[in-house]
Structure formats: C-alpha cells, structure tokens
Image: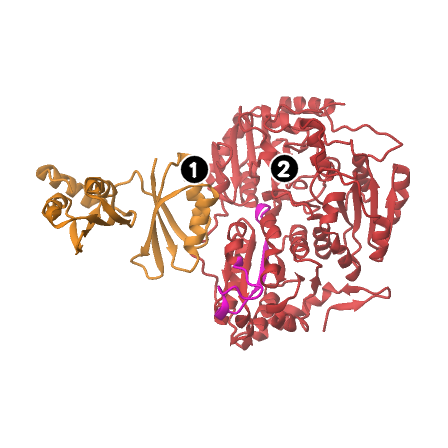
Chain colours: A orange, B red
Amino acid sequence: MNRVLTVVVLNKAGVLHRVTALFMRKALNIQSITVGATEVEGLSRMTIVISDIDERGIEQAIKQLNKQVDVLKVSDITEEPIVARELALIQVNSPVQTRAVLSTLIEPFRASIIDVGRETVTVQAIGKPEKVDALISLLRPYGIKELARTGATAIRRDVETMFEVARVSKANVLPI
Amino acid sequence: MKPFYHSKKGGRFIDMGAQVEIKAKAAEQSHRQMTGAEMLVEVLRRESVEVLFGYPGGVVLPLYDVLYECEIPHILARHEQGSIHAAEGYARVTGKTGVVISTSGPGATNLVTGLADAMMDSLPIVAITGQVATSVIGSDAFQETSIIGVSTPVTKHNFQVRSVDQLPRIMKEAFHLASTGRKGPVLVDLPKDVILSVGEFDYDEEVSLPGYQPTTVPHILQIRKLLSAIQAAKKPVILAGAGVLHAGASCELLHFVEKTQIPVVNTLLGLGSIPGQHPLCLGMGGMHGGYTANMAMYEADLLINIGARFDDRLTGNLKHFAKHAVVVHIDIDPAEIGKNVETHIPIVGDAKSALQMLIDEADGSANTAEWLDRIRRMQSEFPFWYRQDDSTLKPQRVVEMVHELTYGDAIIVTDVGQHQMWAAQYYPFAKPGHFVTSGGLGTMGFGLPAAIGAKLGKPEKCICAILGDGGFQMTLEELAVLKDYHLPVKVLIFNNFALGMVRQWQELFYGERYSESLLPFQPDYVKLAQAYGMEGYCVKTESELLPVLKEAFANDEPVIVDCRITKEEKVFPMIPAGRGIHEMVGVQP
C-alpha cells in the first residue's frame, strides 16, 4: 500500500540525500517526492509517497528519519484527513480538427491548455493524484507525446474546517 | 613544547600529563582572529582532547603545521584505517571521544571501515578529513572524494565546513553529537581554503540542534509497567548490552540485579557490564554464547533488554527467540525498539537513568528461587568445554592463562573470528571497559590498532591483544607504532594457519571444502617482531607458553607471541545458521 509521509527538514545542502539514502538502505522505492519551502524560513517540507510498504517498514522508516539531525518532524498522514494535490503537464497530439473535442474533454477536470503548437497542445492539470491519473488515461488515446508530473504534495486539513466542508458538501453534492 | 620525550632505546614516550595546562590556556583565546587550523586546535583543547590519531597529507598540511607545536600528542598510524581503529579502541576504554585526522581522497576513504565499525558499535568518534579547496570541489581535483556522500550512511552525522566562521560552531556540534544520546561517529570535512582562511573564533554559543533532542530520562509509567511485569514473572532474564557500558551504568545494573535476583545474560559487547563471575551472571548469549544463557532467554517469561539491539548473532532465528516472554526493551535509540523483536514494554531512555529509576521504585526480590535453581542445574551440566591436551596448545587455555596471570585485570583487545569468541567465552570480565572488540561490523584488522588506542587511553593497564593470524596480517603495519611511541602491548597471535571461523563453517556446513580459508604461508612472526625491534616468541605447548607470558606480563615492553594452535579446534557450542537459540550444537564433548 502507498504511504504518504510529510517530513519537515532544515533547508540545507545534502538533506535530500540523507533522507533518500535512508530509503535506499531499506530498499524502499520512492513513488514521488516533492520539496519546497514552509511558512517558517529555513525549513522545507517534503511530501514523500512510498509504494508497497507494510506497517513495520513504515514505522522503521519514520524512526530512522526522526534520527536524522536535519529532520525536525515526520508525520505519516496516509490515514489522516489531508488535502493532496499534484500538478501534471501533458503534451498531447492534437491536430486542429480534434482540438475542440480535447477542450471539452479536459473541462470537467478544470484543466487548461497552456501552450498550443502546430500538432500538439500542452494541458495543465492540478488535482488529487487519482484525478490526474484519470485525465491522463482519457488523453492517452489521442497520443501523449510527453508527460511531466510533480508528485503529490500534501497538507493536513484543518479539522474544524473539514467538518464545515462536510456539512456544506452534503448539501451541494458537488465533489471537490 | 611537544609532549614526547625520547627513550634511551629510541622511540617516543608520551607524557599524557601535559594535558593539565591545556584547559587553563583555553580561556584566554576567545574572540581572537585565527586561521581555520588554529581554530581547530583550539577546539580540541576546549574539548579536552588528550590524544589525536592521524595521518598527514596534501590538503591538511596547514593543519599539521599548527599541530607541529601543539601540546596534544598526535599518534602517527601507518595507515588511516589504523588511526581510526586506534581512536575506537581509545573511545571504548575511556568513554571519551576519539579524534582522528586524515587528508582528503584516499585518506578519507581509508577511514570508512572504521566509521562503519564505530557506527555499528556506537562509539564516539570525531573524524576530521581534509578536502580540496571549495573553489575546486566537484571538479575531480587531485585527491578529491565526496566524503560527505561516501560517509553519510556510516556516520551519525557529517558536516562540510563551507567557511571559516562556521568552523567553531560545527566542531562544537560534532563533539556534542558524537558523545551524547546514542553515541557514534561524526565526520567533519574541512576544505583547504577553510583551513587557511582567517576568522573570529567564537566558541561560547550554545549548541543549537533543533532536530536532535535525544530522550534520556524514561517515562515513569513505563518503568512501573516493567516492575509489575517483574512481580508477575517466574522466569525473568535481563539481557545487558553495550548500552549499559556506554551509559556508565554497571554499578546500577549490579545493584538492581542483586536487589531483584534476576539473572543476566550479556551480549558480546555488553561483557563486563556485570562481573563475569557473579553468581547471577550467565555470560554471553548468542551464536557462540553459553548454553545456559541461551536457554534462559529461550525459556524466559520476561526478557528485559537493557541497551542491546537484538542483533541476529544474539537472537538466532527470530521465530524461536524469547517466544514465551514478555519483551521489555530499554534503549536510548527509539529506532532500535521493535526493529527486530516485537516489544511489549518499550522504554526509551538512557540505561543509567532507567536503572536508577528501577532501583528506586523496586520493592525487592522477584520470585526467582525456582528459576535460579533450574539455571544452576543447567550451568553445572553444560559449561563451556574443550579437551585439554598437553601435546598441543589449546586456545581456550591460553585465554584462561592470560586471565590467571593478569589476575583478570588486563584489557583484552581482539580481532574478529574464532579467537574473539574464545576470549569472550573464557575470560570472565570483572569490570566495564576491559573488552575491546569489533562487534556489529566484525572488522578483521581491528585488533592491533584498537590495542594501540586502548593503551593510550589506559596507559597504566596491561593491554593484551588477542588476534588471529588472518586479522593480524591485515593491519600489522601498525606494529611500528608500538615501538615508535613505546606502547607495551602484548600481542598474542592465535595462529592456526587458517581463517579459523571460515574454515570451521566450511568443515561443518560445506563438506570440508576449504575454499580460500587456509593460509599455509605465514611470515616468521619471531623475525617480524625483531624487525620491528621487539621480542618475539613462537610457542607450541602450554609449558612453553607459561614462562613467555610470565615474562611478558612482568616487563614494560611490547611483545609478539606466535601461539601455534591446531586448525581443527572449533568454537563450541554454536547455533547453526537459521536455527533457533535452543538448537545449539556442540553443547557437550
């Protein structure tokens, strides 16, 4: 099963290497990893998705991460209320005659065309990783020339807002 | 200025007493302009470093130039690997941080085995490596290696100093990290331009490592849980590991054990944490441990691990290990708890604090009379055994002789293999810090240099290096150091013309196919000793060995004794690979 970890680290040279080296030692495959700044200067947040890992494996990985001097906080947020988003840039074959179809196709995904070429368009999609997966499989028949995904970045939901959202969404039915 | 004085026979004597003035001098130096090299030396003074192990080279030339007139003795090993193993030996017997210096590139990579060894055995080491100048890092400059990349998995932490202003803070953090929490090796990489440039020396600021706050005091509720488990237990056993020694908790362990009457099994590296001849000490457990020690862990209904990490050489097949027991694990490193063995009562903290809390809270003796009876019966029925034979020299007997002739007061340093196991089995360690051996990594070649470090750490002690012929030949270049610095280490080579442990496994499990495990050609160790300016002996029987050992332990000279033992002698009992702790073979003759 995939696990999602967030790791708050000092923003220093070599920290990424220390973190990934731990996964390498335990022969774990990193599905995706994103790193960026946090609200505190000098700290970065990593969102790491690890594939095929059992309870024991993730527990060990977390403990080893915690031992790292440059790591401040590790959380396994897999089973927590989180919002996770990913950005994908998809360059799709698109001769002029299919272009309108394509636009209709991506519209429900709130994706947009950000670059247009003679034979291709580049689609930008942002959403949950599963949603991005779905869009990609829909676009595949048209011929994907290149694909770049950032991997998921995630943050815990504010629990109070979450209840609010749940209440509202029950009324409105529209999934986010 | 140099703390060496020359002996009549040549060689340097080290005056460790020169250290007293160092601290007084240190106070004057704050906020002064200094070069990186001067700063480093000033840090070593502030950290009360007694001795440096190292080897010079290109980029560290400016550092060695400052060391030329530094009062801290520098021991010039003959190989960088020797220098770091010596630092490990020093750290092991003193509990202080061992400091090692090397140059960039090959100098740094030659430290890697020692770093890995210190990492596995949690020894406090600060390794200072030179690096090419910051302007050429990454350009494949002469003697450049990315030692930060190479050493990351085998160090507790490492640093590259990018500017001279960072140097004092980083060094302070390095010493702090190496010597606190779960101790370990820390590497500081110093580019040449940093060594040379000038900055302000400020060593007063506190260490600020927000990501490093080891828990040392355990939670009282967990301690109480353990005490009620003890009350409920009928067959409790303590497993005491190196954590007890690192925490300096031997007195507390003894007190707790005597109060509760719970028997103690030691790990290899935990030997000496409780007196070896104490009635409640069952000796070493594990692959070549005692039958009673292993059966006690197998049958136990409560296993209290204090500062051990349930290494596979101890547990045997995990399916059978302590399967009837409530498992308690006291460890300063939370990552060790539950790593190998499912733990019912985890206690994160330093062994000394935990034991002190246990002593304070414990009501009295556990109900162990019946259990101890069973253990005594096993002990008398299944002691360690070997067949005595006057025509050959028995390695087990040699260990016993060393124990008798030194009144159990010698510090025993070993290499890795059969001789290491015989030393662990037959030398009852009475006190902590008297056994120096490479446990987790099992580094052949560790013994001789580690003995050098041990002697420097404890100059008043008799240091007896028990080595195999294989491991000795891996680092025998360090013999020069014995004579150079007048370090009267007694080197006993258990010479069976083979890599004994490999040979033993091939005999037992590989149909006697001795693939590359025999060493039919050996140098003449007597002549080798003479070549290095020391006495050498070759002995083939106990009666030949006795006078040699008596003479060796009485004088103040290094010596090499080539003890010819038979190839066929095996280490027993043993747990064959993949078997459970209760499935030992060779338990009885």
Q: State yes or no: residue B124 in magenta.
A: yes
What's under tag 1, amino acid-wise? Answer: Gly
Up the image or down, B348 lies above or below B489; here it is above
Considering depth in this image, is B124 or A27 the residue closer to the camera? A27
Q: Look at 67% across and 67% down and name the residue there.
A: B72
Residue B132 sits in quarter: bottom right
Q: Position of residue B60 (x, y in %)?
A: 61, 68
For the record, the magenta segment spans B119-147
Residue placed most toward the observer, B159 or B179:
B159
Kindly identify which residue carries mark 1.
A57
Q: Residue B362: x, y in percent?
A: 55, 35
Residue B77 visible in the current orientation: yes
Label 2 and label 1 in one chain: no
Residue B284, compared with residue A68, is above or below; it is above
Q: Secondary structure at mark 2?
A: loop
x then y, percent, for residue B177: 52, 56
Q: Which residue is mark 2?
A: B267
